[in-house]
Image (tube, coloured by chain):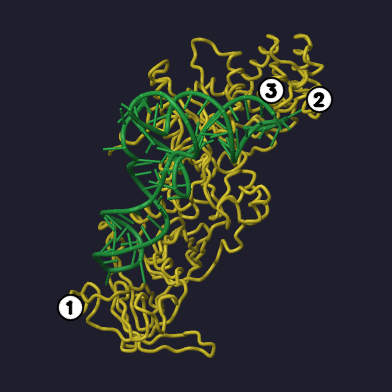
Amino acid sequence: MGEEEKSLNFIEHIIEDDLKSDYTKEDLRFRFPPEPNGYLHIGHASSICLNFGLGLRYDAPVNLRFDDTNPAKEEKEYVEAIKRDVKWLGFDWESERYASDYFQQLYDWAVVLVQNGKAYVDSQSSEEIAAQKGTPTEPGMNSPFRNRSVEENMELFDGMKNGDFAEGDHVLRAKIDMSHNNMLMRDPVMYRILHKAHHRTNTDWCIYPLYDWTHGESDYIEQVSHSLCTLEFLPHRELYDWFLDQLVSEDRLRPKQREFARRNVSHTVVSKRKLLKLVESQVVSGWDDPRMPTISGLRRRGYTAESIRNFADTIGIAKRDNVVDVSLLEFHVREHLNKVAPRVMAVLNPLKVVITNYEEGKEEWLTAENNPEDEKAGTREIPFSKEIYIEKEDFREEANRKFFRLKLGGEVRLKNGYIIKANSCTKNDDGDILEVQCTYDPKSKSGSGTAESLRKVKGTLHWVSIPHALKGEVRLYDRLFSDATPDGHKDRDFMDFVNPNSLNKITGFLEPSLKGAKSGDRFQFQRLGYFNVDLDSTPENLVFNRTVTLRDTWAKIEQKN
RNA sequence: UGGCCUAUGGUGUAAUUGGCAACACUACUGGUUUUGGUCCAGUCAUUCUAGGUUCGAGUCCUAGUAGGCCAACCA
């Protein structure tokens, strides 16, 4: 396979170094830790592929852990969606965990910190605490409650837990250093009072731990060896380590946090807050709108899990800021679909062609290859008749020799069918072409082996027989944002760059073999692109999404003129 | 005016740790083709800048420059 030749990313270098010093291969354990407050997106896919990929590479377990410490934002719906997406991407977790599983343990440890004088109850408002925090260039001030006795702290913390106080009355803070260079070390809040039901623990708790007090400890409980997160958590590492210092025991593995740069993709946004705004403002139809960069959106759009995994593998992982061009994602889905998607013919912008020397009412079934890339895919029969549709763009009355398609006096081959010649066309008063009259060469049938059938004509067109054609809704998608970095402009809101023409619904004419197409089925509409059957599709009303167009060299040639 | 992180083609990642800057995408050429698809061949870099160490620097040293992160009872 040549897999060994692939160079290591910096995380793998770190692990290799650890393996040479104080870790054994059996120590390795990873986790993917989403907060269930939204849907997973293409950026998460990178993290998923990183963590689960490491698990595969080192034959190490990977947990799926929900970081569910904020009942105000988290919902079961998201938990289910996340599990579905990770599974769909092709990964299995060793065990399904929740930070909320550890609420009791976390509380017990917090009590230890209080007893050791490492944490105290602060009874100021959040505004007061913020005002004392200082700035990156100025030290903060100690809270007047910083030196409460252990007994008083214990009593108050106990009261917090028992629901004796209202939200905001008290918090538990770690006692570290209010003049620390790292703002996060200035007595960070560990617990807040929240009289809210949690999606799993319901009303068992009315105090909830914050991220910093939860994450490293959860890693420690699960004995995660390498806790990988994005770069914005780098300043948290010091606190992660400080909390661990308070409670790790020598005989257990001590997790380490390492950070990598979040992957950005051009012409889209990957921030839950912004994606949520797109959903709530109804720019898109939902989290799984095929234009969304969510895993569920990409899936509905027709992307394959394999193409997303390959994408994640090729962009790799590093520590510098990045914007990956969306064309790389498109490349990977084309690469995969080219191998696996059956070819069919569909006309999206129809122009009627009448074959004047073809017998009225006659019908013929022609043999078509299902996939030239895959012999095992076999063949199918498609109907041919006197009246067919071709694409409007495939006919011009006059054109230069660079135009390989149909023009008056010129010949083209109908894919899997005959060579036809355009003799005349009819137009309406506005000059729009309504119909093209052609003659066909009866001996030129594809695959017949005759000298005429082997003749080379420059152009080959796709087509459908009008009396046999199926109608279907076809949804054509364009980029959701017109700008490459919609959220990269200081003076502009990302919503300003929403592309108003990102969805175009049309009626297409489809070859009849598509009749039984089921939701999720993927096809190549020859010469047009890859399409899949949408969730909204029914046997009576077929609905297709365009996943991605084919590479279009002709469009580029035309653009230059 | 603090601390920390980062800098390699248009894009994303590599470089046996000091030894010929590589791979993929994009773009552009050409060839093949009953999909203007696929496939095949080719073209596109003063490694942020300036000094220094060295036979030799993307890699080490010094000084800059640019970008990012950090002041939620969010994660």
Neighbor class of circle 2 (other Cα within 10 Å; few <14, some 14-19, many 20+) is: some
Specify whether disc 3 shares its chain with disc 1: yes
Q: Which residue is mark 3?
A: A190
Q: Are marks 2 and 3 on the same chain?
A: yes
Mark nearer the N terminus (2 vs 1)? 2
The vertical placement of A452 against A493, above or below, is below
* x then y, percent, for residue A229: 54, 31
Element class at badge 3: strand
Disc 2 residue type? Asp
In the rendered view, would you say A98 is above or below A384?
above
Inspect the image, locate mark 1, and give the three-letter code of the amino acid beneath it.
Ala
Q: How many marks?
A: 3
Q: How far is the residue under mark 2 from the one under mark 3?
A: 14 Å
Decide which of tag 2 and tag 3 comes sooner along the chain.
2
| Nearer-the-camera pick, A165 or A540 | A165
Residue at the spot of label 2:
A169
